[in-house]
């Protein structure tokens, strides 16, 4: 696979109106030629006794964490894991996830991060498509593995329990509560527990001296890209190393010893990079949350008092709808960042009001990114923010807005496709040259640009405003209609908790908008549906008013908590619930 960063060509300077918000020295990113493991090790050498991660109240120092990683690296070496081998990690946010992740990186192997609740066929596809030789997953899902291993080239399966890193009392309690969940797996040389795996390093004289740099492939994440079909995104060490440098320059009030709550999953670039790797590299504590329960928001926050909250908009909706957090003191929160989906103006205002009422100076801001460039591209924070924007490009990143038909750069404030240039671009989609060439294109300015498939515009100050997916844009009677705008208007109605708008076929208008609405507690469809319809007529152009309004108790979600608008599009024939 060609390294696009080594290709020589004459390049034109990229306009960067946002540069005034950074010092000149902050705009230049020189990525050191190191691996993720080495970057973490450097932090450990500075702050050996600081807490690297917290798991169910158990604090583990950087020094201890590095020892755990080194031990696992020797165990992988004894299993004959080599540079370039792919190991599939199919786990929630557990300590073992991070230990395995960095141990593989130390060996120059590639971590293939997969959702732990993936179906049997999805796990099989993830293993086969990446030619994984090893699989690490939850012990309770042995039943999913036993039927697929014969169709793979797996050499070993390592089983982990969420209780492996708990203290003895929590471990006993966990096993008693979950005793009926487990299907016992045969213990042999092929299937092994995490303890048996790590025991392989005992009394070993193996020394791992190889060092891997920024251009070594490190991680495979999974993305629908611009086409919606799942693809394996290959990322180098450079993407993670750069992200940590960028985060430090953007979050100026983040200090060593602060904590980031890792609710976002490790198989998502936002979670793995921003909540875990970057946080720890900057000397912060990552609070690992293997399974998020919105009903226990108050307990989670009160016990851990996280400095930084990062999540998709639905996480903040869950926060506001939890009655137990009404009296919670949130003064410990410095940053609240929303990403992964558009944050409506209505939700932004509600969250900011909540923080103010609960003693926090934090204001919710948005970030934006793609798996293909490791999640974080833009960020709004501190005083560099405009309501409704996804912020400005992080140092070293560039964005332009183009006309999708002509590839010409749009003027300021004109909606088009968001294109991204950064040193953190993926190497490409694994074994998919056609899709790679569609996503990564060389423009007339000589630069390689990632075509996001997202719509947005840039203002004169360089702030970016996202308007949704290019394929979600609705064309009705020749007019371009952006679902996010309709959603924002409907969610500003006092009875509405959440709204998602999709386009549905129409015999002569081509497409028309259809709104799926969730009402707040205490409101009933029969009393407010006419009022909401009239509210839309008053606040939207005629061609934007939804053709249909469907009321649901809840909206379907994707695996990372975004509203699944594709599922809504496929459910258009269903009646109201």
Image (cartoon, rainbow, N blue to C red):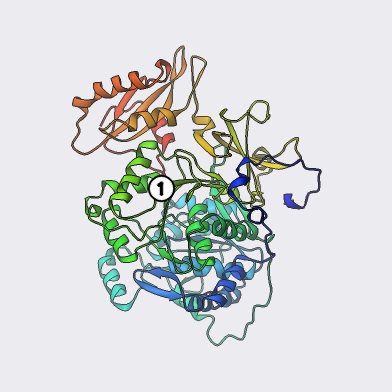
From the viewer's perspective, is residue 571 above or below residue 34? above
Q: Residue at x 26, y 57 (%)?
A: 328
Quadrant location, the C terminus: top left
The total number of labels drawn is 1
Q: Which residue is mark 1?
A: 364
| Residue at 26%, 33% in the rendered image | 494
Image height check: is 418 above or below 234? Answer: above
- Residue 252 drawn at (x, y percent): 51, 58
Residue 147 coordinates in the image, percent (x, y) = 45, 57
The x and y percentages for residue 151 are: 54, 55
Question: Depth check: 119 or 95 in front?
Answer: 95
Q: Nearer the viewer, residue 566 or 87?
A: 566
10 Å crowding of disc 1: few (<14), some (14-19), many (20+) = many
Point out residue 359 in the picture as x, y percentages from the top left corner: 30, 55
| Image-based side of 207 in relation to 444, left or right | left
> Looking at this rendering, what residue extends furthest in the top direction?
508
Specify whether 367 is left or right of 16: left
Whether residue 319 is visible here, answered yes or no, is: no
Residue at 59% across, 77% down: 78
Label 1: which secondary element: strand
The reply, left or right, for residue 473 in relation to residue 547 is: right
Against 198, is 281 above or below? above
Q: Is residue 438 visible?
A: yes
Instruction: From the viewer's perspective, tell me whether residue 329 is left or right of residue 286.
Output: left
Q: Nearer the viewer, residue 40 or 113?
A: 40
């Amino acid at each position: 696979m060609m390294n696009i960063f080594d290709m020589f060509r004459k390049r034109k300077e990229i306009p960067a109106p946002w540069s005034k918000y950074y010092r000149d020295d902050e705009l230049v990113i020189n990525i050191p030629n190191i691996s993720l493991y080495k970057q973490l090790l450097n932090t450990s050498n500075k702050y050996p006794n600081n807490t690297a991660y917290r798991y169910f109240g158990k604090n583990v120092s950087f020094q201890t964490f590095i020892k755990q990683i080194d031990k696992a690296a020797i165990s992988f070496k004894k299993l004959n894991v080599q540079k370039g081998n792919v190991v599939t990690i199919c786990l929630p946010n557990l300590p073992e996830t991070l230990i395995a992740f960095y141990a593989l990186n130390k060996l120059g192997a590639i971590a293939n991060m997969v959702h732990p609740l993936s179906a049997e066929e999805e796990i099989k596809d993830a293993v086969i498509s990446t030619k994984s030789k090893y699989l690490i997953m939850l012990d309770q899902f042995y039943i999913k593995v036993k039927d697929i291993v014969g169709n793979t080239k797996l050499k070993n399966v390592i089983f982990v329990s969420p209780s492996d890193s708990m203290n003895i009392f929590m471990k006993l309690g966990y096993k008693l509560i979950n005793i009926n969940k487990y299907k016992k797996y045969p213990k042999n040389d092929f299937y092994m527990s995490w303890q048996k795996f790590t025991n392989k390093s005992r009394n070993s004289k193996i020394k791992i001296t190889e060092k891997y740099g920024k251009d070594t492939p490190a991680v495979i994440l999974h993305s629908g890209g611009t086409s919606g079909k799942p693809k394996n995104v290959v990322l180098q060490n450079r993407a993670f190393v750069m992200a940590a440098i960028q985060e430090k320059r953007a979050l100026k009030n983040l200090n060593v010893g602060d904590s980031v709550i890792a609710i976002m999953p490790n198989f998502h670039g936002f979670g793995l990079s921003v909540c875990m790797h970057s946080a720890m590299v900057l000397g912060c504590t990552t609070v690992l949350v293997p399974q998020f329960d919105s009903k226990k928001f108050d307990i989670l926050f009160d016990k851990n008092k996280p400095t930084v909250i990062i999540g998709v908009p639905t996480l903040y909706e869950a926060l506001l709808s939890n009655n137990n957090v009404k009296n919670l003191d949130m003064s410990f929160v410095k940053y609240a960042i929303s990403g992964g989906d558009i944050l409506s103006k209505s939700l932004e205002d509600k969250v900011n009001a909540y923080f103010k009422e609960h003693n926090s100076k934090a204001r919710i801001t948005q970030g934006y990114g793609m798996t293909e460039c490791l999640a974080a591209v833009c960020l709004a924070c501190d005083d560099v923010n405009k309501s409704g924007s996804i912020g400005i490009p992080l140092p070293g990143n560039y964005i332009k807005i183009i006309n999708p038909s002509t590839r010409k750069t749009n003027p300021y404030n004109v909606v088009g496709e968001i294109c991204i240039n950064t040193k953190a671009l993926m190497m490409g989609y694994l074994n998919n040259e056609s899709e790679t060439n569609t996503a990564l294109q060389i423009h007339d300015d000589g630069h390689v640009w990632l075509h996001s498939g997202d719509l947005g515009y840039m203002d004169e100050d360089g702030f970016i405003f996202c308007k949704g997916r290019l394929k979600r844009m609705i064309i009705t009677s020749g007019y371009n209609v952006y679902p996010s705008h309709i959603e924002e208007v409907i969610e500003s109605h006092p009875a509405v908790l959440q709204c998602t708008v999709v386009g549905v076929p129409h015999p002569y208008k081509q497409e028309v908008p259809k709104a799926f609405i969730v009402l707040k507690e205490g409101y009933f469809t029969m009393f407010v549906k006419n009022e909401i319809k009239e509210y839309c007529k008053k606040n939207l152009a005629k061609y934007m008013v939804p053709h249909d309004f469907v009321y649901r108790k809840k909206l379907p979600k994707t695996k990372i908590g975004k509203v699944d608008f594709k599922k809504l599009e496929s459910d258009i024939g269903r009646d109201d619930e």
